[in-house]
C-alpha cells in the first residue's frame, strides 16, 4: 500500500492552501509487517528534508539513520528501517507555525495519524518522539478509552515506564529531529537507549 495515496483519500474539508501544505509519507509498504510506529512531531518546512525524501541531504532521513546506527542497528536508508517492520511518521502533517504547538493545531490533523495507526494490524509498539506526539496519541486514546495513555508529566519522569493502548506498548521518548540533537548528546543517548529497548522487543 502507498501511504500517501491512502491518506489523500481521506482528506476532509480543507482549503487548497491547507492541502498543499500536507506532507504524507510517500512509501509503499506491507502494512502487515509493521511492528513499530515511531511518531515524530512535525514535518520540516521543506518536504525534501522529510523522512521519505529521495534527497541524500534530507535532514530527517539523516537524523533517523544516525540514531539507528548509534543504537547498534546499522542502516543506510529508510527502506532498511521499514524492512525491519519500523514505520516513521509525523504527528502533524503540515509544518508548525510557531515553536509552541497549540492543541487545536494537533487536532486538525489527528484523523490522519489515527488512520495510520489503524493501518497496522500487527503493531506492537508506538514510540512517541517528543511532546507533540505524546499529546496527539493521548488525544486518540482519550477519544477511544476516555483516558490518556501517557501521564502529562515531563518525559524524563516517565521514560522507561510501561504504558499500553490496548495491546500496543506506548513508549515516550524525545523528538528525533532538529539541531538540538547535535548539541544535546545526553538526549541523543536517551533516544538511542529507547530505540535499543524497542529493538530488543521486536527482533
Image (cartoon, grey):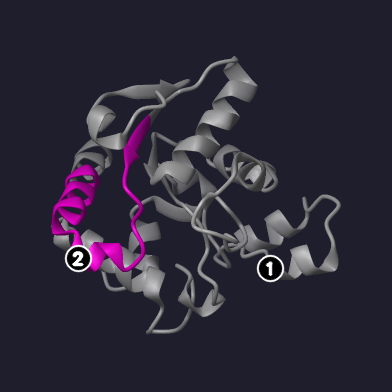
Secondary structure of the residue carrying tag 2 is helix
The location of residue 126, given as percent across then percent down, is: 41, 38
> Between disc 1 and disc 2, whose residue precedes?
1
The location of residue 91, given as percent across then percent down, is: 53, 49
Which sits in the foreground, 174 or 122? 174
Residue 121, can we see it? no
Quarter of the rendering occupied by the N terminus? bottom right
Quadrant of residue 127 within the rendered picture: top left
- Taking the spot 51% from the left edge, 54% from the top edge, the residue there is 90
Q: Which residue is mark 2?
A: 183
Q: Residue furthest bottom?
A: 56
Q: Which residue is mark 1?
A: 21
Q: Is residue 56 left or right of residue 197?
A: right
Give the extent of the magenta segment: 170-195
Q: Is residue 147 left or right of residue 172?
A: right
The location of residue 178, given as percent across then percent down, is: 35, 65
Q: Which mark is residue 7?
A: none
Which sits in the foreground, 6 or 49? 49
The location of residue 110, given as percent across then percent down, is: 64, 42
- Taking the spot 51% from the left edge, 79% from the top edge, the residue there is 48
Q: Residue furthest top?
A: 146
Amino acid at each position: 500500500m502507498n501511504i500517501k495515496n491512502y491518506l489523500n483519500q481521506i482528506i476532509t474539508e480543507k482549503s487548497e492552501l491547507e492541502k498543499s501544505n500536507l506532507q504524507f509519507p510517500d512509501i509503499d509498504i506491507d502494512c502487515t509487517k509493521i511492528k513499530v510506529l515511531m511518531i515524530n512531531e512535525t514535518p520540516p518546512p521543506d518536504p525534501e528534508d522529510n523522512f521519505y525524501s529521495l534527497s541524500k541531504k534530507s535532514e530527517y532521513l539523516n537524523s533517523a539513520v544516525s540514531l539507528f546506527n548509534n543504537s547498534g542497528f546499522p542502516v543506510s536508508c529508510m527502506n532498511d528501517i521499514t524492512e525491519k517492520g519500523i514505520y516513521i511518521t509525523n504527528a502533524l502533517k503540515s509544518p508548525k507555525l510557531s515553536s509552541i504547538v497549540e492543541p487545536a493545531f494537533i487536532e486538525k490533523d489527528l484523523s490522519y495519524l489515527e488512520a495510520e495507526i489503524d493501518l497496522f494490524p500487527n503493531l506492537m509498539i508506538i514510540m512517541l518522539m517528543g511532546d507533540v506526539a505524546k499529546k496527539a496519541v493521548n488525544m486518540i486514546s482519550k477519544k477511544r478509552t476516555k483516558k490518556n495513555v501517557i501521564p502529562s508529566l515531563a518525559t524524563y519522569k516517565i521514560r522507561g515506564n510501561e504504558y499500553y493502548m490496548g495491546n500496543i506498548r506506548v513508549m515516550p521518548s524525545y523528538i528525533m529531529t532538529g539541531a538540538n540533537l547535535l548539541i544535546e548528546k545526553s538526549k541523543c543517548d536517551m533516544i538511542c537507549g529507547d530505540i535499543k529497548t524497542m529493538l530488543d522487543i521486536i527482533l
